Amino acid sequence: MRLRHFAMTALLSLTAAASRAEVTGTINPPLSPRNASYIIDARLDPANRTITGSEVILWRNITTKPANELQFHLYWNAWRDDRSTWLREATLGSRRVVPTVRPDERARIDVTVLGVRGNARADLTTVMRFIAPDDGNADDRTVLAARLPQPVAPGASITIELSWTAHVPRTFARTGVIGNYFFVAQWFPKLGVLQDTGWNCHQFHNGTEFFSDYGSYDVRMTVPTGWILGATGVERERHDNDNRTTTHRYHQDDVHDFVWTTSPDYVERRERFEHPTLPPVDMRLLIQPEHARQAARHFEATRAALKYYGEWYGAYPYGHITIIDPAYRSGAGGMEYPTLFTAGTRLFAPEHVEDPEDVTVHEAGHQFWYGIVGNNEFEDAWMDEGFNTFSEARVMGTWGAPTYFSQRYFGGFVPYVFKDIVLDRETDWNRFAGYRRAAKNDVQSTPSFRYYAASSGVPTYNKTALWLNTMERWLGWPTLQRIMSTHFSRWKFKHPKPQDFFDIANEVSGRDLSGYFDQVYRSSNAFDYGIQDLRSDKDGDKYRTLVVVRRYGEATFPVDVRVTFTEGKQVTEHWDGKDRWHLYTYNWPQRAVTAQTDPDHVLLLDVNLTNNSKALTPLDGFGPKAATKWSLKWMVWLQDCLLTWSVFV
Amino acid sequence: MTTVTAVQAWRDGVRRVARAPAIVIGVWLITTLVSVPLALAIRVELMNHLGASMAAATAAQGVNYEWMQEFADQATGLGVTFRPTIIGFAAVLDNLSAFMDAVSRPVVVIGAAATYLVLWLFLAGGIIDRYARDRATGAHGFFSASGGFFFRFVRLAVVMAVVYGSLFGFLHPWMFDQLYPRLIRNVNVERTAFMIRASLYVGFGLLLAAANVIFDYAKVRAVVEDRRSALGAVAAALHFVRRNADAAIGVYALNVVLFGFTLAVYAVLAPRAGGTGWMMWVGFAIGQMYVLLRLCVKLIFWASETSLFQSRLAHAGYIAAPAPAWPDSPTAEALRPNPTPNP
């Protein structure tokens, strides 16, 4: 007993010590290969909106092939002029950013020095060239390549030196400056990912995000003194310079990107996430002054994400997280970066509506799906965005009070909360309505950067969340949770491909789910099952009941068909859903009342739910009653509309 | 003669509207009659979409938001307006917001609104004439006045269309699509942007109100003074408002307050989605009470402005209350082939 007491005390002491341990950004032993580590020194000139920087990259070739050249992302050149691939693709989408930006507000990044030091010392500045591996656009300058004088053998390392100058844009795609709010993301020359097949270094596309190797980042940022700075990692040093600037040094191991933000206006808050079985996490919130009263909501949502993702998939290993509340119209809202994310809220943000909680859970959740499991967002964005939307929906459906639908009026400023409409996980949080509208727009297995820009989010976010949730309802949460946690543990700090997930799903579930993945991943076919016909006619002393169930969509999935008869009798049939239609007949003393396909709503991708059921006689007249009720409400709306316009007489 | 204050004129306007309930009921009937065909049309659309689906049960018992979205996604024309924003007080916000932001509506709704405005244009002469006399004029007298003033008001409507058209066709896009984006271009604080937008709403609203006041008094002067020239009536209205600015603005402001109060009451009482059965009809009745109140407010605008005008510019030759002697309005008299001699 005494021994047990001693053990408990020791354990509690260790836990307390661990929770008091200083978070430094250093992680030992390494969690990732750390084959691309960066030491960066950057100086911000806020007046001229420029960044002057230099960096040293310690890069190791972890492939089985020698590397003959280097390829770098220069993301900010995507907004240099209208000829970039990003801005050309923007015209296909809905981002109307181009006309509102003056030429002097465009971005650019110019590499002034590129060299390799060490034994293979060489100046590569003169051999730098822009390439366009995706579309051959000669005017796109988002990928820089330079041939190495000597190949880097597998397992060998080199040290790369770069200097560059960059112009901070007026915010484009969550990056840039508005007023004195700077959000500096994707801002430095960054190596692509070398794979056995060669460099994976895509041009910057309008509809996609990023991909890079893990490493350690040690970054010095010089900004005006008094400005508050937030960044990936932990602040190690800070010193004031003579010229009214301050240099902040941040460090973080085992991440694949580095972001920072600075503004004199941020209000800083700190809280801590604690959990009986998960490691503690220091939470730092930089919030806009006008949102300061919403700080607790940001912390609670972050806590929810850390708790549920931690319990379901695995622990958050960094010990700290920074939440950024972006400035109004900065366009920086809702984006993930390692150990830091942007949330996003509004001046008028009633309780129990979507934001800021939903966006906070989503972006905090990206620390797991994107940050820790680092899939290629250019090619398989659904693997983080979709997994994360599914997880976010699950958190929102599990955590806290109901969330109501809300709408904004008067230029989008004034919210109104519809207490009649509680958002539900299966449809609303999984973004079903958006999926239904663009279900067939793209095959999910198409590389993400080739999705149709205007609807690229649908196969990425919505469809994945819906098919994962369908798997949950089909196989059960314990099975799906094991699939996802296995995927998480096997692929953390690595770059999984889709087949890796599918293999794990088959292995863990003990079933061959390939047919399902063929439907949802390798096809853009829509699911639509419905009751085409229901009859129940007197035949002697019994009723002859006919149920015709039809597959209206091209995609197939096994569905149940439930027929309910008088006296409460029910029969549930299991249909493989492969034929175009199927007939069920019954000769029973009871008369059929209703028939339903997929009565338990397992298949969340069914694009037409209204045709899923039929009542023999409109159920207690609910059809006409519903139509009457809603037409009366609509009529009052119309009367009000007429009255509003009557001001003209 | 004692000068009537804005408050007195407004109270007198309320009294005049209260003394003529048939007008309130009449305009409510018209509002309803214009709406009912479209409501029936959308009912058919909803019925067809629901069919015999069990989704109808949840749609009847509360809000089946999924079905609502599915319906709206496949709808065209009128159906695209079937969204959650029709529920309760959201309907008012939706319409006011759409009005202030100049959001267009489906053609069918615009058609209904055009019909509605023409009907108001027809009735306006009779209504103002009735309030000016402040005594029962009978259906014949009312419609005679309506008919008599209709074509003058059509001419006035041309002027109004030019002014309102300029406000919404040129000024509004300039203020909200060009000026506003410029003003908030470098604003990164939402409160500031909100204040700027609110200021623009106020500015635009004031211009709209100014035009509204002028045109209201133009109608009043056209009726009370039996003016035939639309431009002359507008000029006279301008003259009146300029010389009686305090009272004219005061009356208008009191009416705006009453309008706001009506909205506030409805914001509290507006029915939520609810179910079917008698509660559905109670909800609908509350909606109709709100519509009636809104109509009363519109009529009080005219009645109080008529009262103010009559109190400030009384003249023997004008229609002025109280003058309960035959004939009715000069127009009615002119329209009658054999006017009955005064008793």
Image (cartoon, rainbow, N blue to C red):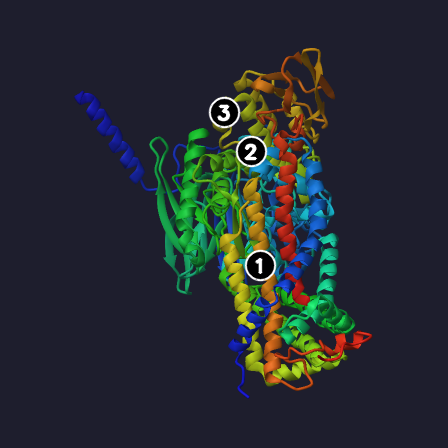
State which tag comes first along the sequence, 3 or 2.
2
Residue A413, given in percent of the width and then of the height, sits at: 54, 57
In space, the residues marked 3 and 2 are separated at their CA atoms by: 14 Å
Chain letter of the residue carrying label 3: A
Residue occupying the point 61% across, 79% down: B322
**In the image, residue A445 above or below residue A3:** below
Q: Where is the C terminus of chain B found, in terms of image quarters?
A: bottom right
Q: Name the kind of residue labelled 3 in the image.
A: Trp
Residue occupying the point 71% across, 41% down: B45
Chain letter of the residue carrying label 1: A
Mark 3 or 2, which is nearer the eye? 2
The residue nearer to you, when weighing B301 against B125, is: B125
Q: Name the kind of residue labelled 1 in the image.
A: Phe
Residue A325, given in percent of the width and then of the height, sits at: 47, 52
In space, the residues marked 2 and 1 are separated at their CA atoms by: 30 Å
Q: Pointer 3: residues within 10 angstroms few (<14), some, or many (20+)?
A: few
State which tag comes first along the sequence, 3 or 1.
1
Question: Which residue is label 3 attached to?
Answer: A477
The residue nearer to you, when weighing A115 against B70, is: B70
Q: Are marks 3 and 2 on the same chain?
A: yes
Chain letter of the residue carrying label 2: A
Question: Which residue is label 1 attached to?
Answer: A410
The residue nearer to you, when weighing B302 against A545, is: B302
The residue nearer to you, when weighing A258 against A465, is: A465
Q: Are marks 3 and 1 on the same chain?
A: yes
In space, the residues marked 3 and 1 are separated at their CA atoms by: 42 Å
Question: Which residue is label 2 attached to?
Answer: A426
